[in-house]
Image (cartoon, rainbow, N blue to C red):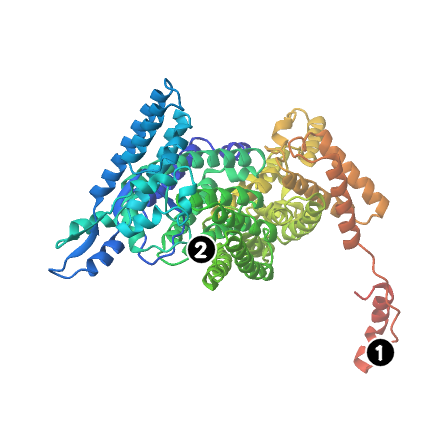
């Protein structure tokens, strides 16, 4: 039958699951592509930079702030003193000529006697030509050629740096005076003798202003540090390197694509090996994917807000996702999924290590405090703790980064944690309504005795309803003992026999007058078929009433494939008594179609179902008789192979029997009789009934 194939097949991510993962990957990648490439983040002036920007190449730009300052100092027709950049090149060329002559002299002196008058004359001529003291030349000649090149490179850097500023003759005289300038003590300090006055007057200084305001930054320079102010000058730098930063963003986009692929592999391996296999359903994968995409978009939008310290609010998305996944799906998977989201967000938003740690921490707290089915009070407490936790983390980040403390940071961090919790709890009912998972909220609603299907069961099949309630008590207690899903099992037990609503009068618990037993006039095979069909009838009813699919297995597996012995033995006896009119019964016609229990929960339900039926049929029993009966029931199911796929261990079975024993003894205790009350005063109209009342009081306990 179709329902058997559907239930016996383990939920897995088939081709539909692969398509769902592919759609998820493309959607996440497209979202990041829009953020990084199509609409890259542009900082407004005055904003506090959320991350450090480093120039990928050497850049040269005009500092608009410096240019505006210079332009504001000149009036029309007024002569203005500016730095002549040509003088810088002239002094640099002069320094290079000196280096060339020095190296040539070093080679020539190698062939002469250093103490000869000819060698001394050559040194004096070189020093005099550049107005240097001969001691500087002699000192340089003692260096190796490769060391001379290093000294001259350092001297040229310092020369250019000094020449980029105003250099007047008085400054040159001061720098060249020994004792007044400590720079002369360094190996390259003699560069001051190559300085030239670089100031000149001009009536139209705009070109010179632009040249003076031009700034050159080597590759790897910090354009703006994290926490720095976006000034006009910084915007000039960012505009200059934006095409090259875009190239970096393409590489960053590729890195995020690889990160997403790695996360998907980790998530799938966890779901396949460790999580509940129901999470591998295509519908669940799509739900988780949509949650991830939604909170990825929320995190990017929060990180792009043009507000100071807005990047501290990105953790909102991580904490909210983790909270929802804990409450609806799986606690441990919440860590993996939210940490993946945090990793993608921190790379996409270019966060530093401190902010990355701050954002990643949001994945841990919900899994430590929240749990499926936790009470509302715990959820409210979590919201407050989450806000305080994030505020503390934000303070830790600013202290470790040696940044100034700002109250805005603490407020944003607290609001992020608190808001994430409130958002998750607010979205929970809506997510539960769209989710196929048996969430705690759904289970509570299904277990409510005012549920329409349970009310119908109570009205139309009261015996089945009472049986289901007792089975639910037994199964729930046993699952608590072995650490299985107790609430899910209780709800599964409440609905496991709803198929009996189709023909309630054909089942023993609903037959109150044995003389009106509808099976008396039916062949054994027909009776067995009616009994068996309550399983597919129950599945059909579950679909019609939109029960969660997680309950289908409790309906389908609670009888496994065991034999309907009563009618099979009846058919055998009829065959033995009249072989001609009653053919030999086929065993397959008297067996449930299965499958056998595929989980601990459905196996516990099977044992609870049989235990309740057998103990109800046996009537009174003492503790030893009950213990023997439970051992017999479990042993029989083991011998029939009904528990082979259930994953129940021997230790689990002992705990299950102990739980059943405790519940049954507690529910079937005998109450003490109350002392006999004195007879009530007699009235004339009760005289005839006095004897009967006395008999009732002496023979029946007062309950």
Dot 1: element? loop
Q: Residue furthest front?
A: 117
Label 1 Cα crowd, 10 Å radius (few <14 / some 14-19 / many 20+): few
Q: Nearer the viewer, residue 73 or 284?
A: 73
> Residue at coordinates 59% horizontally, 36% vertically from top-left?
274
Give the position of the C terminus as an image quadrant. Answer: bottom right
Q: Nearer the viewer, residue 698 or 384?
A: 384
| Cα distance between the residues tagged 1 and 2 | 78 Å
Residue 595: quarter of image: top right
Above or below residue 667? Residue 114 is: above
Q: Is residue 243 left or right of residue 278?
A: left
Q: Position of residue 546 (x, y in %)?
A: 48, 48
Kindly identify which residue carries mark 2.
313
Q: Position of residue 372 (x, y in %)?
A: 58, 51
Q: Is residue 315 left or right of residue 205?
A: right
Kindly identify which residue carries mark 1.
680
Q: Position of residue 655 (x, y in %)?
A: 75, 42
Label 2 Cα crowd, 10 Å radius (few <14 / some 14-19 / many 20+): many
């Amino acid at each position: 039958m179709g329902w058997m194939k559907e239930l016996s097949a383990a939920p897995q991510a088939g081709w539909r699951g692969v398509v769902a993962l592919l759609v998820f990957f493309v959607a996440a990648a497209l979202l990041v592509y829009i953020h990084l490439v199509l609409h890259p983040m542009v900082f407004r002036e005055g904003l506090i930079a959320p991350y450090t920007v480093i120039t990928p190449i050497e850049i040269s730009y005009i500092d608009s702030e410096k240019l505006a300052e210079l332009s504001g100092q000149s009036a029309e027709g007024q002569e203005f003193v500016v730095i002549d950049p040509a003088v810088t090149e002239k002094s640099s060329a002069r320094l290079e000529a000196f280096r060339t002559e020095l190296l040539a002299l070093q080679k020539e002196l190698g062939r002469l006697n250093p103490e000869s008058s000819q060698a001394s004359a050559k040194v004096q001529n070189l020093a005099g030509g550049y107005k240097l003291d001969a001691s500087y030349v002699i000192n340089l000649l003692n260096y190796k050629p490769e060391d001379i090149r290093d000294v001259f490179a350092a001297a040229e850097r310092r020369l250019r740096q000094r020449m980029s500023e105003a250099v007047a003759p008085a400054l040159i005289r001061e720098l060249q005076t020994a004792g007044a300038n400590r720079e002369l003590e360094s190996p390259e300090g003699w560069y001051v003798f190559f300085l030239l006055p670089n100031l000149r007057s001009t009536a139209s200084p705009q070109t010179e202003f632009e040249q003076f305001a031009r700034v050159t930054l080597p590759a790897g320079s910090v354009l703006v540090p994290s926490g720095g102010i976006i000034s006009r000058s910084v915007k000039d730098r960012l505009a200059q390197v934006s095409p090259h930063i875009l190239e970096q963003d393409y590489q960053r986009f590729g890195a995020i694509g690889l990160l997403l692929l790695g996360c998907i592999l980790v998530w799938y391996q966890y779901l396949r090996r460790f999580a509940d296999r129901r999470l591998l359903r295509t519908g669940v994968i799509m739900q988780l994917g949509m949650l991830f995409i939604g909170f990825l978009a929320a995190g990017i939008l929060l990180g792009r807000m043009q507000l100071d310290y807005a990047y501290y609010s990105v953790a909102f998305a991580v904490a909210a996702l983790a909270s929802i996944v804990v409450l609806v799906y799986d606690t441990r998977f919440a860590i993996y999924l939210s940490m993946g989201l945090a990793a993608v967000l921190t790379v996409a938003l270019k966060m530093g290590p401190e902010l990355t740690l701050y954002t990643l921490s949001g994945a841990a707290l919900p899994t430590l405090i929240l749990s499926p089915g936790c009470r509302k009070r715990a959820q409210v407490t979590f919201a407050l703790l989450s806000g305080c936790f994030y505020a503390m983390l934000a303070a830790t980040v600013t202290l470790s980064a040696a940044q100034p403390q700002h109250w805005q940071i603490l407020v944003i961090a607290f609001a992020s944690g608190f808001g994430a919790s409130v958002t998750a709890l607010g979205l929970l009912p809506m997510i539960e309504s769209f989710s196929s998972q048996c969430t705690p909220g759904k289970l509570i609603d299904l277990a409510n005795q005012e549920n329409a299907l349970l009310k119908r069961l109570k009205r139309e099949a009261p015996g089945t309803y009472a049986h289901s309630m007792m089975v639910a008590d037994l199964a729930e207690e046993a699952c608590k003992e072995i650490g299985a899903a107790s609430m899910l099992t209780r709800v599964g037990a409440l609905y496991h026999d709803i198929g009996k609503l189709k023909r309630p009068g054909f089942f023993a618990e609903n037959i109150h007058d044995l003389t009106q037993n509808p099976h008396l006039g039916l062949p054994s095979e027909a009776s067995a078929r009616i009994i068996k069909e309550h399983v597919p009838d129950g599945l059909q009813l579950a679909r019609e009433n939109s029960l969660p699919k997680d309950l289908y297995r409790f309906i389908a597996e609670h009888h496994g494939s065991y034999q309907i012995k009563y009618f099979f033995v009846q058919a055998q006896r009829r065959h033995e008594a009249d072989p001609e009119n009653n053919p030999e019964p086929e065993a397959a016609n008297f067996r449930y179609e299965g499958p056998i229990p595929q989980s601990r929960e459905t196996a516990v339900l099977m044992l609870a179902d049989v235990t309740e039926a057998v103990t109800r049929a046996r009537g009174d029993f003492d503790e030893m008789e009950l213990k023997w009966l439970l051992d017999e029931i479990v042993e029989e199911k083991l011998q029939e192979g009904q528990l082979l796929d259930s994953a129940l261990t021997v230790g689990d079975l002992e705990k299950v029997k102990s739980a059943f024993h405790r519940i049954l003894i507690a529910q079937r205790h005998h109450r003490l009789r109350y002392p006999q009350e004195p007879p009530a005063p007699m009235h004339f109209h009760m005289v005839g009934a006095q004897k009967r009342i006395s008999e009732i009081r002496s023979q029946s306990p007062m309950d």
